[in-house]
């Protein structure tokens, strides 16, 4: 006869779920960082092509700035997903929820700042501008 109680199997399943979610969260973190790194490399290549084509630094700078900025935006969104997975599925404590809230606020502010820098307007203004054209 086993010394395990009726709830021991539930703890094993919960532990396995937590281990899987930790790996999923880590995957999203790596994907977010890779989006930024790959975007940086792509921005350098595209900027180099623009400079070679036009023989001017201005177009290369603009291509570099917009390409890299968009990859940073994508990377930040993926990193927020990693934080959500870790906080909700792995360690749902009140302290972790506070940290998640702070990280989401900071990353959202960074995303909006980058979006304004790249587009020249707030994200919610884009919908107004496109509907006025229709």
Image (tube, rainbow, N blue to C red):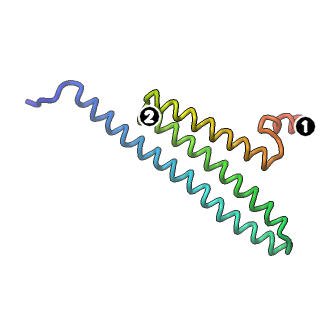
Q: Dot 2, how many residues are within 10 Å of its Cα: few (below 14), some (14-19), or many (20+)?
A: some
Look at mark 1 in the image and give the residue it sits on. Answer: 134
Q: Say which element carries label 2.
A: helix
Can you give x and y, in whole percent of width and height, for residue 40 in the image? Answer: 65, 61
Residue at the location (49% across, 38% down)?
Answer: 85
Relative height, residue 50 to residue 69 (above, below): below
Numbered label attached to residue 63:
none
Nearest the camera: 14 or 116? 116
Q: Quadrant of the N terminus?
A: top left
Can you give x and y, in whole percent of width and height, for residue 51 in the image? Answer: 80, 71
Can you give x and y, in whole percent of width and height, for residue 82 in the image? Answer: 52, 43
Residue at the location (80% across, 69% down)?
Answer: 50
Nearest the camera: 133 or 106? 106
Relative height, residue 103 to residue 4 (above, below): below
* Mark closest to the chain's N terminus, 2 or 1: 2
Residue at the location (74% across, 62% down)?
Answer: 64
Look at mark 2 in the image and give the residue it sits on. Answer: 89
């Amino acid at each position: 006869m086993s010394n395990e109680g009726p709830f021991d199997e539930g703890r094993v399943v919960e532990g396995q779920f937590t281990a899987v979610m930790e790996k999923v969260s880590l995957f999203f973190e790596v994907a977010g960082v890779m989006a930024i790194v790959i975007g940086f490399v792509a921005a350098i290549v595209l900027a180099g092509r623009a400079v070679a084509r036009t023989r001017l630094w201005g177009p290369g700078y603009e291509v570099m700035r917009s390409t890299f900025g968009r990859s940073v935006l994508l990377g930040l969104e993926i990193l927020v997903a990693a934080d959500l997975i870790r906080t909700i599925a792995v360690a749902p404590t009140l302290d972790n929820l506070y940290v998640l809230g702070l990280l989401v606020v900071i990353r959202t502010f960074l995303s909006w700042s980058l979006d304004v820098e790249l587009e020249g307007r707030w994200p919610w203004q884009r919908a107004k501008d496109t509907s006025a054209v229709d």
